[in-house]
């Protein structure tokens, strides 16, 4: 088994564990929940949803329209601007690996502020900047290089999962479109929240941050 397939297998297992934890929190609400999934896709939910799920409504907000089935709804929008929804419109906001894609820290703060505004509870997963392997390319420490250096690598070489960029513009876009967060930044983005390590190969690959009353879950380490 090569590195890419190994990482894919580990990521799938982590995603399954993450969703089980999330659904345990949803079950703790003692009522069918309304959920806004920021960056959500039907492909993700098809792997987990059953008619017995404790869910009344799920709004999948993304940059593209999706074909959905009840209880799902599809809307197009911006993760940093949820102004179409009033405060506390949802029981839960869920977001999986989106926070690192919205731009710089100011945009990430806008997204976090909107998530905290529109829901009573939230559960957000985001990759850890300090994880030694760059999850885009699977090249150790590649994400720690300056953006300009990353762009030159993308333009000159096939990098892990990426073929060689076709142009300088494409290479620069690949190099700059992801900004993983640091642990201390989550304290600013989600003040007072619980942060849980999601580990892979003994390292903290990602963070899960939530504001549900339960602060401990089996198999995870609270911080």
Image: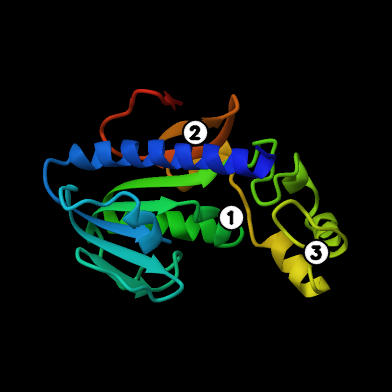
- Dot in front, 1 or 3: 3
Front-most of residues 115 and 161: 161
Front-most of residues 8 and 198: 8
Mark 1 residue element: helix
Query: What residue lies at 61% left-to-right and 59% top-to-bottom?
Result: 104
Query: What residue lies at 85% left-to-right and 55% top-to-bottom?
Result: 149
Compared to 177, does 191 lie above or below? above
Query: What residue lies at 44% left-to-right and 51% top-to-bottom?
Result: 96
- Dot in front, 2 or 1: 2
Left/right of residue 2 with respect to residue 63 in the rendered view? right
User: Residue at label 1?
Assistant: 105
User: What is the distance, in whole Å, between disc 2 and disc 1 at their CAs?
Assistant: 22 Å
Compared to 149, does 128 lie above or below? above
**For marks 1 and 3 on the same chain, the one whose residue lies earlier in the sequence:** 1
User: Residue at label 3?
Assistant: 164
User: What is the distance, in whole Å, between disc 1 and disc 3 at their CAs?
Assistant: 28 Å
Mark 2 residue element: strand
User: Residue at label 2?
Assistant: 198
**For marks 3 and 2 on the same chain, the one whose residue lies earlier in the sequence:** 3
Q: Which quadrant holds residue 167?
A: bottom right
Q: Residues within 10 Å of mark 2 (few under 14, many from 20)?
A: many
User: What is the distance, in whole Å, between disc 3 and disc 2 at their CAs?
Assistant: 31 Å
Mark 3 residue element: loop
| Marks 2 and 1 close (CB-CB < 8 Å) | no
Compared to 178, does 123 lie above or below? above
Front-most of residues 1 and 159: 1
Query: What residue lies at 56% left-to-right and 59% top-to-bottom?
Result: 101
| Marks 1 and 3 close (CB-CB < 8 Å) | no
């Amino acid at each position: 088994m090569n590195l890419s397939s190994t990482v894919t297998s580990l990521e799938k297992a982590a995603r399954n564990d993450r969703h089980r934890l999330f659904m345990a929190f949803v079950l703790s609400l003692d009522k069918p929940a309304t959920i806004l999934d920021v960056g959500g896709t039907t492909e993700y939910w098809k792997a987990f949803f059953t008619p017995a799920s404790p869910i009344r409504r799920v709004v999948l907000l993304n940059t593209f329209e999706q074909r959905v089935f009840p209880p799902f709804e599809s809307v197009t929008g911006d993760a940093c601007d949820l102004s179409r929804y009033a405060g506390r419109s949802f029981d839960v906001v869920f977001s999986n690996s989106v926070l690192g894609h919205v731009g710089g820290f100011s945009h990430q703060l806008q997204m976090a502020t909107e998530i905290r505004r529109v829901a009573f509870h939230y559960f957000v997963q985001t990759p850890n900047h300090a994880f030694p392997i760059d999850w885009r390319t699977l090249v150790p420490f590649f994400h720690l290089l300056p953006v300009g250096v990353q762009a030159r690598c993308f333009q000159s070489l096939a990098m892990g999962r990426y073929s060689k960029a076709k142009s300088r513009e494409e290479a620069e876009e690949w190099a700059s479109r992801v900004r993983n967060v640091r642990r201390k930044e989550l304290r600013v983005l989600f003040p007072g929240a619980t942060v849980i390590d999601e580990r892979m190969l003994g390292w903290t690959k990602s963070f899960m941050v939530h504001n549900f009353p339960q602060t401990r879950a089996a198999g995870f380490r609270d911080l």
